[in-house]
Image: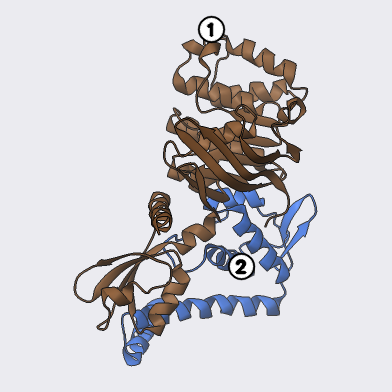
Chain colours: A brown, B blue
Amino acid sequence: MFGETAIQLTGVIQKRPNFRLGPLDLMVPKGYITAIVGPNGSGKSSTFRLMLDLNKAGEGTIEVLGAPVGRGDETELKKRIGYLADEPFPHEDGMKGTEKADFHRFWYESWDVNRYRELLQILGVDDHQALGKMSKGMRRKFEFALALAHGPELLLLDEPSSGLDPLAWKTMIDILHRYMEPGDRTILMSSHIIEEVKRLADFIVFMAQGRVLGMYEKDELFGSWFTFFVSGEQLTAKLAAAAPGQCGVEHAGGSTYRITTSKAAETEAWCLREGLQLIGRQALELDEIMSALMLQDRLSNRS
Amino acid sequence: MRLPIQINEQSAEPLYHQIEVQLRALIVSGQLEEGTLLPSIRELAQTVKCSVITVKRVYNDLEQEGLLRTRQGTGTYVAKVEEQERDKHRLAAVIEALEQAIAAAKRVQCPEEELRSLFDDTISKHYE
């Protein structure tokens, strides 16, 4: 689709006692920001862990930056990746920030102490405290700086902004945009925050119940999901239901119907053809698109 | 540099088209002079909150039209726009705006005569 691939999952399945993840097929393009969105428990964090071989997949293949994952020694590969986990590790509570930074400096040859200091300064973090003594947001900012300080080719960010105040959030967004500036770096992130996805993502992946529902280019996605108010004497619920990409019809008084569509341009052309009047339009928000996709998914699984 | 480009998420017009029309207008009107370095693709994507794919498309299109040129490694610059070319583009933007006004009128079933008189009124309000 778009040049090189940073991450490729093929037929990946992980079975756990209460949850089955997959089969996952996913291609993350190099040079772009891809955001995974989905409800709690849809398997986003598990997917990150599989990519880093922190958990093992039962079936399928995973390739990250051209190297296979899950076959033993990934040390060299991991040096090229920056990872921000969804939760801090409790066993590090007693460790000072400086101590954890020393550990990173030891493992990553490309560790850039100036970059690390600069990030701490921009984010307003003091690394002399014990990690367990830092506030949630402070610890998050510290971990974020750490994930970036060795200049990785690939960033895996699991809900990077959780716990950040609005100012720190904005700083983080700026840092990530600047990180992407060279053009050959890749970010895969998960997020619950609509505005964050809108500001950062080039591609959006929807996940639910351990499966990938679809991957879309952001502007194409937002440009195709609309709610139209359509009016016409001959318009009935049955006719409205025939609109291309229709995912919901509601009577809106008189001869007006509210039609939600995933194919805005086609629905518009359809209105013209049918001699119907388009009297209003409203772009759908990310959460609304997600609910519609999940509903479609449930319906198609039932049939 | 921050380009004065504003997008309307509610519009039927695709995002890349909205950005392209406005950037073209900035160039042919001379507001962006020859040789101006444009923001990087990621930077412009950040300010208008669109994907880099959209900005790449806009820069490519305008490069094809000869309004921009890209120097490997240094960035995208405003190219020299000939007088004749400038006129053509200048009016193209106006024609497009008029088309949109007429589409809006048709949406509310405004008859031709009424539209004409509205147009005349608007002109006399702004010219004189």
The vertical placement of A15 against A127, above or below, is below
**Residue A181 seen in this snapshot:** yes
Question: Badge 2 is on which residue?
Answer: B24
Residue A158 percent across, percent down from the top left? 53, 33
User: Mark 2 — on which chain does it sit?
Assistant: B
Q: Residue at x 75, y 26 (%)?
A: A73
Identified by mark 1, the residue type is: Gly
Q: Residue at x 51, y 45 (%)?
A: A211
Identified by mark 2, the residue type is: Arg
Instruction: Sort mark 2 into few (<14), some (14-19) or many (20+) by Cα contacts within 10 Å.
Output: many
User: Mark 1 — on which chain does it sit?
Assistant: A
Asked whether the residues under the numbered discs 1 and 2 touch, taking CB atoms below 8 Å apart as contact, a structural biologist would say no
Left or right: where does residue A279 sit relative to residue B91? left
The vertical placement of A90 against A246, above or below, is above
Front one among A70 and A124: A70
Q: Residue furthest top?
A: A94
Q: Secondary structure at mark 2?
A: helix
Front one among B38 and B53: B53
- Give the spatial CA distance, label 1 vs label 2: 58 Å
Left or right: where does residue B1 sit relative to residue A208? right
**Residue A119 seen in this snapshot:** no
Query: What quarter of the picture does the C terminus of chain B occupy?
Result: bottom left
Q: How many marks?
A: 2
Q: Residue at x 74, y 67 (%)?
A: B80
**Which of the 4 image quarters holds residue A7?**
top right
Picture disc at residue A166: none
Front one among B31 and A144: A144
The vertical placement of A47 against A297, above or below, is above
Residue A219 percent across, percent down from the top left? 53, 58
Left or right: where does residue B74 sit relative to residue B40? right
Instruction: Sort mark 1 into few (<14), some (14-19) or many (20+) by Cα contacts within 10 Å.
Output: few
Picture disc at residue A94: 1
